[in-house]
Every structure is written in structure tokens, then in C-alpha cells.
Image (cartoon, grey):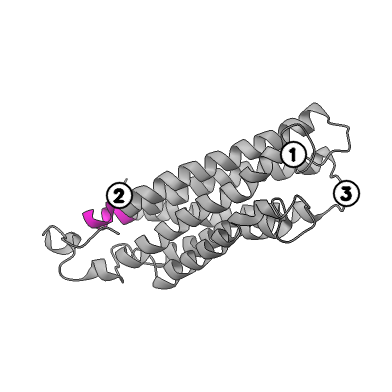
């Protein structure tokens, strides 16, 4: 698969992840009390599809960054590793929620706060996911700014979203009220902030499809860049 094909697939998956999230996120706000099983299973299915598209997007982005120069191999690897960890944690948390509903299909349980593993699951949706997202987007933002595979505003936006996610890591100290903005399972933590990464992927996916292959705008585009001159880059990778 050549670079142009990778860019198209990566951009398309970023857009797909964002559009699926646009449909799925509102499902978490439809009911004031425990949602019906159909609602929970629908949003979990959309979450699974979002994770699949997001994983392909992030691995594609890491590939493009790595291809732009050996000096960027480390941040590209960090993006790949954090992406795998983030998607795994998100899918495990979704599976735990689905298990509560599948065991009690006619019950009145909210799987985000009810069930034998609900309180442990709060960290997977909250602080753990926020930390992984912060690492992922910090690395992605740095890699984008250094490599120039995307416009610089996408790198700056990634870093801003990473900072917001990092600010929510201590939320585990602020209770388990799902109606609160800042708590272990608060809507500002597990719904609003959690969705920012896929909205960023949507914007970055569009930008990627609109940026011609081989176009570099960052420091890697300089005459000393390994992709241009073939001379090893002596700059630090981070």
C-alpha cells in the first residue's frame, strides 16, 4: 500500500470515527434514569465501531509520521502504543457495561453506575482513559508539528485536547455522581471530554484528505530532513 492509499484510508477512518461518535454520544443523554437495554446496546455497538475506526486512523497517522523521518520513530511508536492501550481499555469498559445489560435485559439498571464491576469500570471510562488519551494526543500533536504530515493547527489542537484530558485524571477523588460535571463518572469526564478525541480525529481526517501526499509543513520539511536528503537526522526524537 503506497502513501496515498494510506492517507486516504487513514483520513476516511478518522472521519468515520467522528461521525459515528456524533450519533452515539447523544444516546447517553436521552434518559434521566436507567436507560433501556436497547439504548445501552446501541451505544455500545456504536462505541465498538468508533474504536475500530479510531484505531485504524491512529495507526495510519503513526505510519505516516514514521515514514517522514527516522528521528520521529519514537513519537510514532508512542502514538501506536497509546492508541492500542486506549482502544483496549475502552472496549473492556464497554464489554463490562454490556454484560450488566445482557444479564438483566429487562431490569432497570444503569450499567455506568450499577452492577458488580461498575465502580471499578468508572476508572476505565474516566481517569485511566483520560491519562491514555493525554499521552496519545500529546505524542500525536508533537509528531504532527515535527513531521508536517498534517496542518499545524491539528497538532496544536491535539495538544490542547491532551491538556483537557489530563485535567480530568484526578476526578476519581470527586465522588461517583454521574450527574456531576467533574467526578469519577461525571458527564463532563466520561462523555464530554471523552468525545473530544474522536471529534479531533474527524477534523484531522478531513485535513488529511485535503492535504496532498508528500506535502510537509513542519521542521521535517527542511533541507536537512532525512526524507529529502538521505542524511541521518541528528535532532532529538522528542
Whether residue 67 is in magenta: the answer is yes
* Label located before the other in sequence (1 or 2): 2
- Cα distance in 3D space between marks 2 and 3: 50 Å
Along the line of sight, which residue is nearer the eye, 37 or 139?
139
Q: Which residue is mark 1?
A: 41
Q: How many marks?
A: 3
Query: Dividing the picture into quarters, in which one does residue 232 lie?
Result: bottom left
Residue 68 is situated, as x and y percent measured from the top left of the image, at 26, 58
Q: Which residue is mark 3?
A: 33
State which region is magenta. Answer: 65-73
Asked whether, in this view, residue 56 is left or right of residue 20, the answer is left
In the figure, 84 relative to 192: above or below? above
* Label located before the other in sequence (1 or 3): 3
Residue 214 is situated, as x and y percent measured from the top left of the image, at 28, 63
Q: Which mark is residue 2?
A: 2
- Mark 2 surroundings: few (<14), some (14-19) or many (≥20) residues within 10 A: few
Amino acid at each position: 500500500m503506497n502513501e496515498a492509499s494510506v492517507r486516504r484510508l487513514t483520513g476516511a477512518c478518522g472521519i468515520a470515527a467522528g461521525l459515528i461518535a456524533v450519533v452515539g454520544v447523544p444516546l447517553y443523554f436521552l434518559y434521566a434514569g436507567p436507560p433501556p437495554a436497547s439504548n445501552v446496546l446501541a451505544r455500545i455497538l456504536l462505541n465498538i465501531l468508533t474504536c475500530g475506526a479510531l484505531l485504524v486512523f491512529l495507526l495510519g497517522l503513526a505510519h505516516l509520521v514514521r515514514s517522514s523521518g527516522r528521528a520521529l520513530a519514537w513519537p510514532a511508536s508512542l502514538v501506536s502504543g497509546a492508541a492500542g492501550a486506549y482502544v483496549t481499555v475502552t472496549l473492556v469498559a464497554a464489554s463490562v457495561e454490556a454484560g450488566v445489560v445482557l444479564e438483566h435485559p429487562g431490569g432497570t439498571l444503569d450499567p455506568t453506575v450499577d452492577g458488580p464491576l461498575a465502580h471499578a469500570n468508572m476508572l476505565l471510562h474516566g481517569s485511566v482513559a483520560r491519562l491514555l488519551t493525554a499521552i496519545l494526543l500529546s505524542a500525536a500533536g508533537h509528531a504532527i508539528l515535527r513531521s508536517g504530515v498534517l496542518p499545524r493547527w491539528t497538532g496544536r489542537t491535539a495538544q490542547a485536547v491532551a491538556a483537557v484530558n489530563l485535567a480530568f485524571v484526578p476526578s476519581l477523588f470527586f465522588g461517583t455522581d454521574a450527574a456531576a460535571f467533574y467526578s469519577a463518572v461525571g458527564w463532563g469526564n466520561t462523555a464530554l471530554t471523552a468525545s473530544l478525541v474522536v471529534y479531533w480525529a474527524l477534523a484531522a481526517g478531513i485535513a488529511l484528505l485535503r492535504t496532498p501526499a508528500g506535502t510537509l509543513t513542519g521542521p521535517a520539511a527542511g533541507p536537512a530532513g532525512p526524507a529529502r536528503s538521505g542524511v541521518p537526522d541528528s535532532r532529538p526524537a522528542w
